[in-house]
Image (tube, helix red, strand yellow):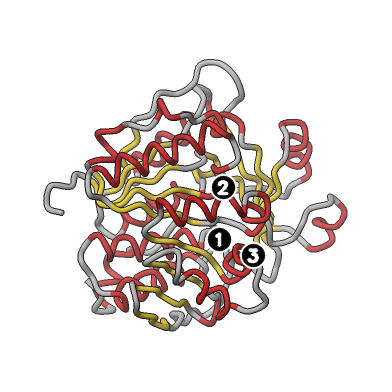
């Protein structure tokens, strides 16, 4: 749509990521579920922060990471997420704007502080996330700017934000605005933890509002309570026209209306940190979709972006994604 102001607009938990190297023993000693997202309160966040190894701090959040990836590829991205008017809130706003993403949400002056995600990365590159949602969980329908949603090719919804009732209302408001404007709506399931809590609600959202779904193998099987990926794929084909389904080193499967495409993973010399791999995949896929690319190219752009992110510490690209995509003949 030539009149779109943004290629992709993301709505999600606005968090500051705190990343540190860790060990399996540390996870066990501190009761942290490996490879999953664990919701914690403010006291637990303070305690774990004091126990962590020296860390890297950067603005994060799943949908925010995806929007940064879209911008890095040369796309026009915007973001809606709630922070407080505090130090970490300023860090978040500065970082995401500096990355070229539009961010115009009024910071809260009262209530919980800006949220943060404490991420422990073990030697096998698995990331275990401990998330204090803070102000991010206070996002409500009033924070959804109708003009921005209507002017975006795709509105991308982050499953992690689905917990608070006002946020769910914001999702449906955004989806309604997008569809009235003839735009598309996308959802990432984010984590099996989220799916297990809200399976019925996610299914209803997917069946009624979602045009493009992102999920990994575990999330898909949890959604449809199947033993195999193939059974989950068959079930999804009846509910959602398009999807990008990631399978780690086995690449991804792209559902494109009635077509199914198997996309190989891009090779990397060493997997350092899987934090943000799914976010980066969604960025590449959605960028390609907004630019009119075909199913195979969208999947390849997603795989390329994911391979860059897992090759280093942290959830945001370090190399020039646009240059890499051009060299790979994907632009």
Residue designated by label 2: 160
Q: Position of residue 70 (x, y in %)?
A: 33, 56
Front: mark 2 or 3: 3
- Judge left or right: residue 224 versus residue 52: left
Residue nearest the observer in this picture, 103 or 48: 103
**Contact, mark 3 vs mark 1 (Cβ under 8 Å):** no
Front: mark 3 or 1: 3
Indicate the secondary structure of the residue bearing disc 1.
Answer: loop
Residue at horizontal 78 percent and vertical 53 percent from the top: 32
Residue designated by label 1: 313
Q: Name the residue at the right extreme.
A: 29
**Contact, mark 1 vs mark 2 (Cβ under 8 Å):** no
**Local crowd at mark 3 within 10 Å, few (<14), some, or many (≥20)?**
some
Q: Quadrant of the C terminus?
A: bottom left
Q: Name the residue at the top extreme.
A: 110
Q: Position of residue 249 (x, y in %)?
A: 55, 80
Front: mark 1 or 2: 2
Figure check: 109 above or below 242? above
**Local crowd at mark 1 within 10 Å, few (<14), some, or many (≥20)?**
many
**Contact, mark 2 vs mark 3 (Cβ under 8 Å):** no
**Local crowd at mark 2 within 10 Å, few (<14), some, or many (≥20)?**
many
Nearer-N-terminus badge (3/1): 3
Q: Quadrant of the N terminus?
A: bottom left
- Judge left or right: residue 312 versus residue 291: right
Residue at horizontal 19 percent and vertical 44 percent from the top: 5
Residue designated by label 3: 222
CA distance separating discs 2 and 3: 15 Å
CA distance separating discs 1 and 2: 22 Å
Q: Position of residue 300 (x, y in %)?
A: 35, 76
Q: Quadrant of residue 330?
A: bottom left
Nearer-N-terminus badge (1/2): 2
Nearer-N-terminus badge (2/3): 2
């Amino acid at each position: 749509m030539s009149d779109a102001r943004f290629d992709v607009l993301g709505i999600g938990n606005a968090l500051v990521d705190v990343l540190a190297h860790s060990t399996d023993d540390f996870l066990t000693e501190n009761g942290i579920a490996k490879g999953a997202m664990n919701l914690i309160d403010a006291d637990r966040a303070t305690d774990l922060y004091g126990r962590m190894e020296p860390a890297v701090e950067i603005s994060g959040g799943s949908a925010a990471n995806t929007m940064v990836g879209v911008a890095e590829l040369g796309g026009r991205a915007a973001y809606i997420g709630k922070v407080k008017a505090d130090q970490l809130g300023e860090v978040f706003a500065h970082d995401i704007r500096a990355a070229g993403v539009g961010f115009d949400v009024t910071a809260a002056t009262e209530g919980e502080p800006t949220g943060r995600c404490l991420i422990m990365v073990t030697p096998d590159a698995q990331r275990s996330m401990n998330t204090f949602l803070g102000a991010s969980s206070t996002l409500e329908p009033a924070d959804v700017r109708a003009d921005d949603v209507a002017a975006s090719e795709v509105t991308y919804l982050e499953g992690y934000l689905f917990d608070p009732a006002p946020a769910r209302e914001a999702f449906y408001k955004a989806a309604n605005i997008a569809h009235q404007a003839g735009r598309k709506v996308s959802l990432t399931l984010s984590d099996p933890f989220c799916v297990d809590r809200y399976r019925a609600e996610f299914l209803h959202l997917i069946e009624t509002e979602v045009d493009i779904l992102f999920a990994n193998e575990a999330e898909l099987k949890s959604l449809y309570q199947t033993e195999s990926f193939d059974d989950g794929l068959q079930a999804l084909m009846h509910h959602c026209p398009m999807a990008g389904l990631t399978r780690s080193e086995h690449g991804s499967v792209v559902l494109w209306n009635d077509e199914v495409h198997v996309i190989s993973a891009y090779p990397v010399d060493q997997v350092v940190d899987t934090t943000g791999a799914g976010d980066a995949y969604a960025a590449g896929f959605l960028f390609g979709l907004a630019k009119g690319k075909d199913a195979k190219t969208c999947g390849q752009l997603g795989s390329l972006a994911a391979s860059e992110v897992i090759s280093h510490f942290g959830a945001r690209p370090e190399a020039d994604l646009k240059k890499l995509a051009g060299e790979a003949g994907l632009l």
